[in-house]
Image (cartoon, coloured by chain):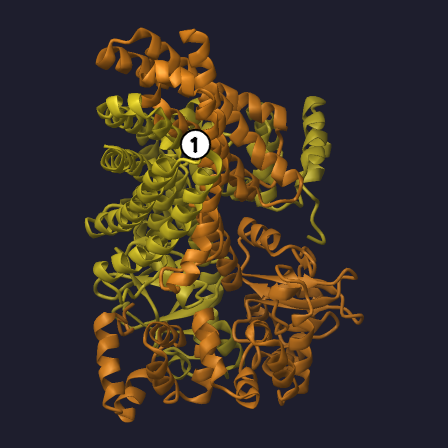
Chain colours: A yellow, B orange
Amino acid sequence: MSDHIKIDKEFIEQLQLLVDQGDEQSIQEKVVNMHPADIAEILDVVNLEEAKFIFRRLTDELASDVIVELDEDVREIFLKAFSAKEIAEQIDNMDSDDAADIISELPLEKQQSVISQIEDKAQAQSIASLMAYEENTAGAWMATEFIAVKDDWNVTQCISELRKQAEDVSYVYTIYVIDKGKQLIGMFSLKSLLFAKDNDLVKDLYMTDVISVNVNEDIEEVAKSMKKYDLVAIPVVSDDNLLLGRITIDDIVDVMEDEAVKDYQMASGISEKIESNDSIWAITKARLPWLMVGLVGGVLGAQVIGLFEHQLGTFPEMAFFIPLIAAMGGNVGVQSSAIIVQSLATNSIDMGNTYTKLLKEFGIALINGLACSVAIFFIIWGIQQDLKLGTTVSISLMAVIIFAGLFGTLVPLVLHKRKIDPALATGPFITTANDVVGLLIYFLIGYVIYF
Amino acid sequence: MSDHIKIDKEFIEQLQLLVDQGDEQSIQEKVVNMHPADIAEILDVVNLEEAKFIFRRLTDELASDVIVELDEDVREIFLKAFSAKEIAEQIDNMDSDDAADIISELPLEKQQSVISQIEDKAQAQSIASLMAYEENTAGAWMATEFIAVKDDWNVTQCISELRKQAEDVSYVYTIYVIDKGKQLIGMFSLKSLLFAKDNDLVKDLYMTDVISVNVNEDIEEVAKSMKKYDLVAIPVVSDDNLLLGRITIDDIVDVMEDEAVKDYQMASGISEKIESNDSIWAITKARLPWLMVGLVGGVLGAQVIGLFEHQLGTFPEMAFFIPLIAAMGGNVGVQSSAIIVQSLATNSIDMGNTYTKLLKEFGIALINGLACSVAIFFIIWGIQQDLKLGTTVSISLMAVIIFAGLFGTLVPLVLHKRKIDPALATGPFITTANDVVGLLIYFLIGYVIYF
C-alpha cells in the first residue's frame, strides 16, 4: 500500500495515547486523510469510549462512510448512542443499500422514526422499499442508485443526464438503457460513450445482450452468475423486466465470504456465525449445540457397546480398537459429504444422478478401505500377533469405510433435494451417526468371528 | 438471466444429439451467440470428442475466450490436441495474465515453443515476464493491459491515447497517471474524464491517493486489500513504484474461492484440491493420506487402552464411554482451532496475544465442559445407576474438553508463527491427537477413582 499508513498495533496504541491525553487536534490530523475502511478497522478494535472520541473528530461525510464500514456488532453498540435524527442525517449520505442494511439492524421502534426523519423523501422511499424485500434475495442486496438513459437520446443528452445522476452513483461501470416503459433493453460502457460523437444516438451504441437477475432471485445464485460471467455489476429487474436497481461486485464478495465462513464453520461444528473477538457467551452458544449432538452420539455408542458387554468381558482386547473404528467412520463420512456439499455449491450443471455418485463413492471407499484394512491387519499382526483380532478389525474397518462413504454421500444429496442446506451434513452430525453404526458393525463382525 | 439460454441437462443432451448427427449448422447456430463461459461449461461436461466437435464450430475470437474459461483439467486434455502454433494463435487474442496462466499449464518443452510462435512480440515479452514471477504473488496474477496517461497531457490527448490503448483493455475502470519515469503518481475515473473540458489538464483531474500493491506481495494480502477498500482493480508496482500491471476483481474472486475451498477441504480431511468429477484415483489420492493419519492415531489409541487392559478387564463398563471421550475431544479441538484459523485469515489487526486467547478459550471450555459433564453425569446415573462410572466419565469429559480446547487454540497459533498454514491444524491431525490424549486422561482418572 504505497501511500497508505500501515494500521498496526503500534499505530493504534499511539492513537489511544492521544485519546487519553484528549488531544483532539492531533487525532484529527491523523485520521482526516485516512480511508473510511481503515478508520472503521481502528474503531472496531479500540474500546467504545475511545471509538466515540475518535468518531467525533470526523467530518460528516467521512463519518457516514465509516459507519457503513464498521463491524456489525460494533455498529450496533455505536448507534445506540445516537438519536433517530442524528442517524437519519448520516443515512442521507449513504447509498440506498447500505442505508437499508443499517436501518434494518436498528431496534424496530427506532427504524420507523429514522426513516421518517430522512430529509430526502425519495431516498427514504427507496430505503423503505428495499427493506421490504425478503432476506437473501437480489432485492434485499441491490442499490437503487444506477445510471439509466433512454434509447432515443443522443450522446449530448446522455452526458448531461449522467452529470445529474452521477452525483449519487460513486462507481458507474455501465450505463443501462431503458425504454419509455422503464423496461431494461440494453447497456453500454462508459468507454463507448467517451468515444462516441455528440449527436450519435444511444440506439446505435448499446448492446441488447444484457445479463440481468430477477429481484426475487436468491443472492447466492446472483453471486454464481456474476462470478461465472466476470461481472462487476448486474442489473436487477422485476418480473416485467422493469429496471429496479443493481448489485455490485463488492457486495458479492461479501456474500461469498459469508457463505465460505458458514460452510467452514458448519464443517467445524460451529452452529452460528461467530468471530474470535465475540464474547465468551456468544462463542459458547455457537459451540455447545454441536457438542450436545456429540454427547448424544456418545451415549448411543455406549448403549451399542453395552449390548456386547459379555463379548467384551471375554475378549477385552476388542476394546483397544473402538477409537480407531469410530474415528475412521467419522473421517470417511466427513470427507465424502464435503465433496458432495462442495459440488452442490459450485457446479451449475449436474450431469450425474444419485446412483452414479454412490457407485463412484463405492469405488473410492473400496480402494481406501482395502489400503487401510491391509495396513491395520499387518500392524496388529506385527504388534500383538493376534490373527483373530487382526481379522476382526480389518474386516470391520473395510465395512465401516464403505458404509460411512455411502452414507456421507447420500445424506447431503437427500438434504439438498428437500431444500435443506446440505452443509448441515458435514458437522458432527455425520461423524456421530457413523460412530454409532461403525461400532455396531465392529461388534457384530467380532461376534461372528469370535463365537 | 433474462436474455440467456438456460444451460441445463436437457440443453446439453440436445446438443449431444446434434453432435451425434454431425449437424454442424445447427450447432453453430446454437452456440454463436452464447457467452464464452456458458460454452466452456458445456465443454467441461460433455466427452472429449463431443467437445472437440463443438469447439471447431466456434469463431477464432470466441474460441480463445472459451479456452480461458475452461476448467483446468479439461483444458489440459484439450490443448494436447493442438500444435504449438495453433495455441500461439489463440494466445494472441487473450489478455496477458490469462495467456501466461494457460502457457504455464503446458508441458515445459511446449511452453518455449508456444511463446516463440506468438506473432505480437511485445505480447510474447509480457507473457514471458509474467511467467517469471513466483506463484501466488501479485506479479503472477496481474495483467499488463491497463490504461496509463502522462500527468502533463490534456483531456484531448488522453482520449486519443485511450482510443489506442482501449482496444487491448476490455474493462477500463480507472485511468492511471504516470510521470516521465513511468512511476505511478495518481489515478482518475473515466467518469471524471467524461465531464472534463477538452483542454483541462490531467494534472488537475487526478487523485494522488492511490492504493497500490508491490509486485512481490502475496496474492491473499492483495485480496484482503481489495475487499477492504471495495476496489474493482488495483495497480501493481515495482519496488521503485514503476507501474507494471493491474489485478482485477474477477481474479480476486477466484483467489477467494480457491482459499475457501482449500480451508474447507482441510477441515474435512482432504489433502489436495479435488472436485466431485475428478477421477476415482485422484479423489482417493487426496483422501487416503488423512485416513492413514487417522489410522496411526487409532493404533496409538489402541496402545493407550492396552496399557489399561487389566483395569478394563475388571471394569468392562469403562469401555462404553471410550467413543464419547474420543469424539468429544475431537469435536472441541476442531471447533477451537477453526475459530483461530478463521481469525488469522480475516483479521488484519491482531490486538490480542497468545496468552489472552488461551485464557478466553479456557473460559469457553469451562462453560461447555461443565454443561456436558453435568449432562453426562445425570444420563449415566439415570440409565445405569452407576455413580463411580458417572463420576469418572464426567470428570474426564471436563478435563478432555479443556485440554482439547487449549490444544486446538495453541496448535494453529504456533503453526502460523512458524509460517506453516494454520488450516493444517483443523484436519484429522488435531482430532487424532485429541483422541489419544483424551483416552489417556480418561483411563488415568478412571484408575484414580476405581483403585
Foreground of the two, B448 or A127: B448
Image spot of residue A449 (x, y percent): 26, 37
The disc labelled 1 sits on which kind of residue? Gly
The image shows residue B359, relative to residue B222, as above or below, that is above
Judged from this view, the residue extending furthest toward the left is A418
Q: Residue at x 32, y 82 (%)?
A: B50
Q: Residue at x 67, y 86 (%)?
A: B121
The residue labelled by disc 1 is B330
Q: In this view, does B182 lie to the left or right of A167?
A: right
Quadrant in the rendering for residue A271: top left
The chain containing the residue under callout 1 comes to B
Tell me the SS state at disc 1.
helix
Image spot of residue B5 (x, y percent): 27, 74
- Number of marks: 1
Residue B165, visible in the rendered structure: yes
Q: Which residue is drawn at 41% across and 48% down?
A: A374
Residue A261, visible in the rendered structure: no
User: Dot 1: within a 10 Å radius of its alpha carbon, few (fewer than 14), some, or many (20 or more) residues?
Assistant: many
Quadrant in the rendering for residue B380: top left
Q: Which residue is drawn at 57% across and 80% down?
A: B168
Foreground of the two, A430 or B311: B311
The image shows residue A342, relative to residue B374, as above or below, that is below
Foreground of the two, A20 or B194: A20
Image spot of residue A74 (x, y percent): 49, 32
Q: Is residue B92 left or right of residue B263?
A: right
Foreground of the two, B385 or B245: B385
